[in-house]
Amino acid sequence: MKGRGATVLELVVSVAIFAIALGGIFFLFRQGYQSFHHLEKRQGLQVEMLKVKSFLKGDFQLSHFRSIGVSKKEGTYRKEGVYGTETVNVQRDNLSCLILDDWRKKSNYHSITLAPMWNQYAAYVTEANRPTITRIVYQSGARFPVEPLPGLDVYGVVQNQLLTENLLNFNGVLNFDTRDLEIEIELGRTLGGRGVDEKRTFEVYEGVFRFTPLNTQPKL
């Protein structure tokens, strides 16, 4: 008995089943890829926050409280919302403090009191309408007095480093009772869709840090 060939209907049904299965695989793959891509960008904000915190801690925690300068100013950023793009008002302060060019160098400390002999200023500079923080280190070739210095631009720049391009809010508050500095930071950006609907989301990552300058004299 001869074998019967497949009918056109059977071929159509087979192709339809194969197409449905292939479509399901593609759907799961795309959903998984978008979720991974979204999580990867979210982790990127956390890495940036840790980077900024590391620089802040290295400067302000080793500085002198009476040298910390906080210049209060406001800024804006544009956010994609449900009803379109909106402008959000935020705080974009400038912060600065005394530092040393080399904390291990003996000649940078007073021979009797062992207090640091400050020779650099670190400034964290923001812009009103750009989501950036730039760390700028100034040096004059001489020792600095222990006080916030206005007009740092008159000194020579020895370092200039962009720390983030995703800044939303940067707010510094000096606590004179406890002699510490509290800094609130918000980073954010628009991310791709979490799933197949491809809706864009605006993610925010916040951090609040408190630094007590260890070289404040006299100590508490």
Image (spheres, rainbow, N blue to C red):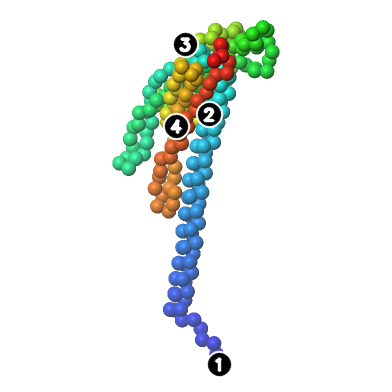
Residue at 68 percent across and 18 percent down: it is 104
Using a 10 Å C-alpha cutoff, classify the residue at mark 1 as few (fewer than 14 neighbours), some (14 to 19) or many (20 or more): few
The image position of residue 37, as x and y in percent, is 50, 47
From the viewer's perspective, is residue 141 above or below residue 125?
above
Task: Give the residue number, with chain letter if any, for mark 3.
Answer: 150
As measured in the structure, the alpha-carbon distance from the residue carrying label 3 to the one carrying label 1 is: 101 Å
Question: What residue sits right under mark 1 in the picture?
Answer: 1
Q: CA distance from mark 3 to mark 4?
A: 26 Å
Badge 4 amino acid: Glu
Crowdedness near tag 4: few (<14), some (14–19) or many (≥20) residues, C-alpha within 10 Å:
some
Residue type pointed to by label 1: Met
Compared across the picture, whether 120 is left or right of 133 comes to right
Given this view, does label 3 or label 4 mark the residue nearer the observer? 4
Which of the numbered marks, if any, corresponds to residue 186? 4
Q: CA distance from mark 4 to mark 1?
A: 78 Å
Q: Which residue is mark 2?
A: 52
Q: Using the image as rendered, state which of residue 53 and residue 18 is in the foreground.
A: 53
Q: Earlier in the sequence, mark 2 or mark 4?
A: 2
Residue type, numbered disc 2: Val
